[in-house]
Every structure is written in structure tokens, then in C-alpha cells.
């Protein structure tokens, strides 16, 4: 199966699919962190619309869409001061980019982002996410709500529910690599995507792997 992982520099999701034998490629404006040859450096929209992909998994920039950045929509980060015009414009551009990826010409599409602001959903018609997952459902004892917008593929099934609800990503110290590290996909989630959304060579069905639950959810 031909898979494009758009807006991914880490190669985590791409590697998970290639491990299972798929023709998977990552894509970002910068080179892949792991130096892989299976990486398309360039515009994500161009890559998504010209590659004849079976599955596209996209991780578009969340800075201007995430609910956590709501205060930046207003001058001085205070609603009483009125809107910050530049920030609203960037939110609009980010919403259009998001929708372009969600509507990419592939039979199966998944777009990932954090909890989203209400404004882009209301103003640009972005639908509610199909599901919200947490890393602790996939073997990582941490919290990081991740929304998935899915088309043509089923919701992910938790593979390894574990103890631990550490907010490691939220608490990351400032630094030059903070943004990159915060956006990196958890390996457990990447493997769930590959094993559950990967299509057999005949293209007739999805893989159906057993679910391993190691402990009860807290």
C-alpha cells in the first residue's frame, strides 16, 4: 500500500508502515530527522495531491488551530483589547491548509491535531474529530489528547492501556527542539496506525490484530 505521512519530519509513522512492508513516505518542508531516503521534502499539499496514495496521514501545523492558543487571538492576549488581526489571518490560512489535507484525493485519509479552537470549526466548516486518543491507550503512560479526523478508515482501537498519566509533553522545558519534540508521534500510536490501517497486498481487507490490555484504565 502506498502511504504518505504528510508534515512528518521524525519518520516515526513512516517507519512503522515500512516495517510492515508498505511503500510509505514521510513529507515535510525540512529533511527527515533520521536521514531516510523515503522522505519527500517539499509542500505537503503538492505531495498529497500528486502521489496516487492509498492512505494519507497528515499532521498539519497546530499553532494557529489549537485551543491552547486561544488567548493569542486577542491583542495583548486579552479579549477586551479586541482581535489580533494577524493571528486571525494565520488561523484562517491554517484552517484552509487543514481542510485541503482532509479532502486530499485518497480513499483513506487521517488528519491529526490537538483539541481545536471553536473558531476554525465554525468559520471554515471543519467537522468534529472522529475520535480523541491518548498515549496511555497505546503503551505510553502519559497524557496528550490527540484528535483524529478519519475518512475511509476505522477509529483506532487501543492496543495497550497502561498506568501513568504524566503530562510530559506539556511540561517540556523551553528550548530549540521543544516544538519538534512535542509534535513527535508516539511509537505505540504509530504502530497501531500501521497495523490497523495497513491494507493487505490484495487491497481486500484491513489487518485485524489482537488487542493487548495490560491494565485497567484509571
Image (spheres, rainbow, N blue to C red):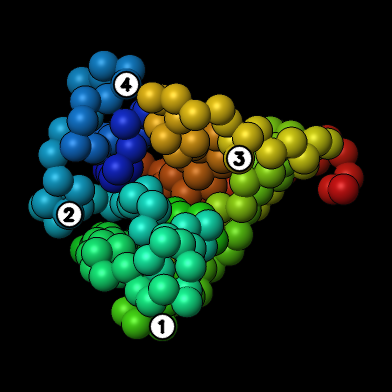
Residues packed near mark 1 inside 10 Å, few (<14), some (14 to 19) or many (20 plus): few
For residue 166, which quarter of the picture?
Answer: top right
Is residue 176 or residue 188 the one in the foreground? 176
Are discs 2 and 1 less than 8 Å apart at CB? Answer: no
Viewer-nearest of discs 2 and 1: 1
The residue at the point 44 percent across, 44 percent down is 198
Image mark for residue 170: 3
Residues packed near mark 2 inside 10 Å, few (<14), some (14 to 19) or many (20 plus): some
Is residue 119 or residue 23 the one in the foreground? 119
The residue at the point 27 percent across, 25 percent down is 32
Instruction: Judge whether 27 appears above or below 77 on screen.
Output: above
Mark 1 or 3, nearer chain start: 1
Locate residue 35, reporting x and y percent.
26, 16
Viewer-nearest of discs 2 and 3: 3
Is residue 54 or residue 84 the one in the foreground? 84
What's the CA distance linking mark 1 and mark 4? 36 Å
Amino acid at each position: 500500500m502506498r502511504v504518505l505521512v504528510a508534515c512528518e519530519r521524525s519518520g516515526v509513522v513512516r517507519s512503522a508502515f515500512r516495517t510492515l512492508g508498505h511503500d510509505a513516505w514521510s513529507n515535510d518542508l525540512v529533511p527527515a530527522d533520521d536521514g531516510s531516503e523515503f522522505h519527500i521534502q517539499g509542500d505537503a499539499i503538492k505531495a498529497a495531491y500528486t502521489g496516487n496514495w492509498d492512505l494519507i496521514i497528515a499532521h498539519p501545523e497546530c499553532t494557529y488551530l489549537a485551543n491552547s492558543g486561544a488567548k493569542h487571538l486577542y491583542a495583548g492576549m486579552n479579549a477586551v483589547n479586541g482581535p489580533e488581526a494577524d493571528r486571525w489571518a494565520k488561523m484562517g490560512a491554517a484552517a484552509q491548509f487543514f481542510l485541503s489535507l482532509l479532502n486530499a484525493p485518497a480513499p483513506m485519509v487521517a488528519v491529526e491535531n490537538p483539541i481545536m479552537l471553536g473558531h476554525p470549526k465554525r468559520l471554515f466548516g471543519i467537522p468534529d474529530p472522529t475520535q480523541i486518543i491518548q498515549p496511555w491507550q497505546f503503551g505510553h503512560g502519559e497524557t496528550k489528547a490527540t484528535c483524529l479526523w478519519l475518512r475511509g478508515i476505522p477509529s483506532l482501537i487501543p492496543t495497550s492501556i497502561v498506568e501513568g498519566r504524566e503530562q510530559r509533553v506539556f511540561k517540556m522545558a523551553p528550548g530549540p527542539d521543544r516544538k519538534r519534540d512535542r509534535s513527535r508521534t508516539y511509537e505505540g500510536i504509530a504502530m497501531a496506525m500501521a497495523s490497523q490501517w495497513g491494507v493487505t497486498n490484495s487491497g481486500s481487507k484491513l489487518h485485524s490484530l489482537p488487542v493487548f490490555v495490560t491494565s485497567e484504565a484509571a
